[in-house]
Image: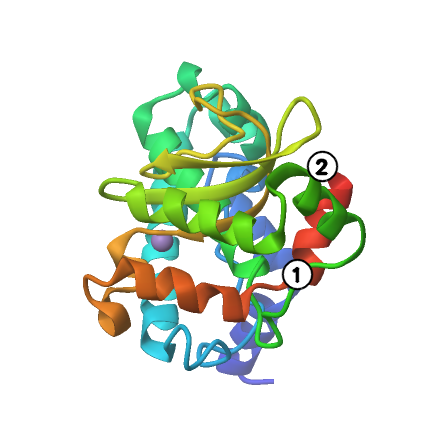
């Protein structure tokens, strides 16, 4: 083995790599967040949500939330607090954690409730809950679209399970979400739409309503049902 091969083998050992991380970064590695890949290809939601929008949205916008969240917590006690807990008590933490922790949570959730075989209508217990809360699936879509269209500036619209266990539609500004202690309507999200312009501007420009309309074709109702059952 020559010197180059020896160094390669040495550096390639996973044990030593792990030790390397510890030496390179004195802070606990567990506290740092990473950007998971999209659960489907960038073009999987075409033609409703275009490839370039998905690529930029995930690879740049979501990545920036992850990077900035890591910067905001680095070297502080917040590294040891799980993201769900930071979000629950968000009023106690710096605004950078609210914006970037919220951004990381919201986007991770958003990618999952969409999918290439999306669309159609909810079924089972979720369909029953929708009918009981809104009258019908169409009425729910109408109310959700209204919340999403009328959210001024940047933010999100949500379907949540409230403290009374009933479904409710709400919206939040910026990267806030209904799990945060600062939210007007608190609850467990089961469905959401990102209405920041970066989510739709390349394809829909200023026509947010057209994007919201197209969104129904990519909703992964299996995942929304799982969220509902777990709420
Ligand atoms: Mn976004």
Q: Nearer the viewer, residue 200 or 61?
A: 200
The correct choice, above or below, for 30 with respect to 137 in the image is above
Secondary element type, mark 1: helix
**Horizontal and vertical percent for residue 62?**
39, 55
Label 2 CA crowd tier, 10 Å (few <14, some 14–19, many 20+): some
- Residue at the image point whose x is 26% and y is 69% from the top: 204
Give me the disc on residue 221: 1
What residue is shown at x 43% (from left), y 38% (from top)?
102
Q: Can residue 24 be seen in this view?
A: no
- Nearest the camera: 199 or 34? 199
Q: Which residue lies furthest to the bottom in this view?
A: 1
Which residue is painted at 51% across and 26% down in the image? 86
Q: Characterize the local packing of mark 1: few (<14), some (14-19) or many (20 or more) Cα atoms within 10 angstroms.
A: many
Residue 138 point in image, percent of width and height: 55, 55
Locate residue 202: give its quadrant.
bottom left
Rendering coords of residue 160 (x, y %): 58, 37
**Mark 1 / mark 2, whichever is N-terminal:** 1
Q: Using the image as rendered, state which of residue 214 and residue 42 is in the foreground.
A: 214
Q: Is mark 2 on a helix, strand or loop?
A: loop
Instruction: Find residue 231 and name its label.
Output: 2
**Quadrant in which the N terminus is drawn:** bottom right
Residue at figure coordinates x 25%, y 56% from the top left:
197
User: Does 165 appear above or below 62?
Assistant: above
Q: Which residue reaches farthest front?
A: 135
In this view of the protein, can residue 193 be seen by the observer? yes
- Residue 21 lies, in percent from the top left, at 52, 49
């Amino acid at each position: 083995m020559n010197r180059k091969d020896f160094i390669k083998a040495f550096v390639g050992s996973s044990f030593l790599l792990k030790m390397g991380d510890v030496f390179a970064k004195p802070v606990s590695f567990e506290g740092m967040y990473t950007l998971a890949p999209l659960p489907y290809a960038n073009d999987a939601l075409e033609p409703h949500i275009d490839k370039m929008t998905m690529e930029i949205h995930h690879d740049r916008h979501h990545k920036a939330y992850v990077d900035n969240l890591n910067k905001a917590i680095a070297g502080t006690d917040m590294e040891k607090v799980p993201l769900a807990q930071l979000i629950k008590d968000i009023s106690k933490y710096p605004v950078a954690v609210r914006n970037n922790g919220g951004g990381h949570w919201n986007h991770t959730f958003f990618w999952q409730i969409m999918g290439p075989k999306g669309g159609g209508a909810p079924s089972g217990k979720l369909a029953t809950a929708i009918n009981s809360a809104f009258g019908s699936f169409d009425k729910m879509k109408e109310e959700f679209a209204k919340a999403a269209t009328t959210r001024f500036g940047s933010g999100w619209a949500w379907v949540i399970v409230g403290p009374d266990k009933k479904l409710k539609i709400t919206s939040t500004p910026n990267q806030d979400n209904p799990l945060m202690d600062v939210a007007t309507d608190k609850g467990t999200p089961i469905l959401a739409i990102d209405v920041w312009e970066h989510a739709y501007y390349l394809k829909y420009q200023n026509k947010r309503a057209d994007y919201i309309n197209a969104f129904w074709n990519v909703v992964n109702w299996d995942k929304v049902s799982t969220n509902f059952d777990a709420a």
